[in-house]
């Protein structure tokens, strides 16, 4: 079975030649993509590795309202997919001393421009999000910009448990949390599950359960 140490070595090898490499991690909502990316960065050393979440390309609420998409937040059409591809292209071109990526603030549920510096020293960039392997035209521009893509394959029951817990931690009541996790999140999970076979590596549930920790209440979470 794949171990976390084996994944760390695989990630390290991607950038071993000195060329900048971009590792993508995808998987359904709550499958542990952010946690895996953070653990990889911790294991590889933060100078040489940067973490760029796709979540920074959420459209802001003001634009979702204008488009009438606020109740579908998190669906493929609620992100700036072309902006994400454009940032990945800039990272791959490796011409600037620093490339700034947007972050996503979970309490505000809004993207924040200029939140994440990707310095020249970062030869490996780990990017993670829902739609890295989607085939629809806008998202299809992303895969060619990634060196390889891993799929976080957490089982549905555990995923739902974690999602509901996180929705409650960030302010939803229990009914709203369950509705969102089994409605909007689940529709997105179905789209993402259909992209699983396009991944280079499947990261199994046992491995995902062995990293990260259950969040403490009122921690900032991810
Ligand atoms: N080993 C673990 N045991 C229990 N909960 C965990 C564990 N690892 C991570 N979590 C929690 O599970 C939740 C989902 O993890 P994470 O944020 O990494 O998933 P994600 O795939 O990035 O989710 P999203 O698609 O919503 O961004 C988080 O609240 C995280 O703190
Ligand atoms: Mg995440």
Image (cartoon, helix red, strand yellow):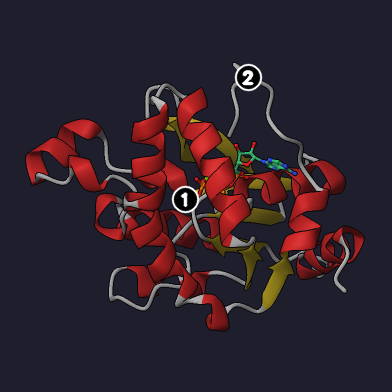
Q: Which mark is residue 217?
A: 2
Is residue 16 shown left or right of residue 50?
A: right
Asked whether the viewer can see residue 121, the reply is: no
In front: label 1 or label 2: 2
Where disc 1 sits, the SS reads: helix
In depth, the one of 83 and 20 nearer the eye is: 83
Whole-percent x, y for residue 115 in the image: 49, 30
User: Is 8 situated above or below 41?
Assistant: below
Residue with the mark numbered 1: 54
Residue appearing at x 80%, y 59% in the figure: 207
User: Is 127 situated above or below 63?
Assistant: below
Residues at marks 1 and 2, CA–CA distance in whole angstroms: 25 Å
Asked whether the viewer can see residue 209, the reply is: yes
User: Is 59 situated above or below 154?
Assistant: above
Give whichever of discs 1 and 2 has the lower sequence position: 1
Q: Residues within 10 Å of mark 2 (few under 14, many from 20)?
A: few
Is residue 215 shown left or right of residue 142?
A: right
In depth, the one of 102 and 188 nearer the eye is: 188
Q: As drawn, which residue projects farthest toward the front?
A: 175
User: Is 59 situated above or below 1?
Assistant: above
């Amino acid at each position: 079975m794949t171990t976390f140490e084996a994944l760390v070595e695989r990630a390290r090898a991607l950038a071993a030649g000195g060329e900048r490499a971009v590792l993508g991690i995808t998987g359904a909502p709550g499958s542990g993509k952010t946690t895996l990316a953070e653990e990889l960065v911790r294991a590889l050393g933060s100078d040489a590795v940067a973490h760029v979440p796709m979540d920074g390309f959420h459209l802001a609420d003001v634009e979702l309202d204008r488009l009438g998409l606020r109740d579908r937040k998190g669906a493929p059409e609620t992100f700036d997919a072309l902006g994400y591809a454009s940032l990945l292209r800039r990272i791959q071109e490796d011409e600037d001393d620093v490339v700034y990526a947007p972050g996503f603030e979970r309490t505000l549920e809004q993207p924040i421009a200029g939140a994440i510096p990707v310095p020249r020293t970062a030869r490996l960039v780990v990017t993670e999000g829902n739609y890295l392997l989607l085939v629809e035209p806008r998202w299809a521009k992303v895969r060619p910009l990634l060196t390889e893509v891993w799929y976080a394959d957490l089982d549905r029951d555990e995923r739902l448990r974690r999602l509901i817990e996180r929705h409650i931690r960030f302010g939803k009541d229990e009914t709203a949390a369950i509705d969102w996790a089994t409605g909007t999140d689940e529709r997105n999970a179905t789209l993402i599950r259909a992209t699983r076979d396009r991944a280079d590596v499947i990261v199994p549930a046992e491995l995902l359960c062995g990293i990260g920790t259950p969040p403490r209440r009122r921690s900032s979470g991810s």
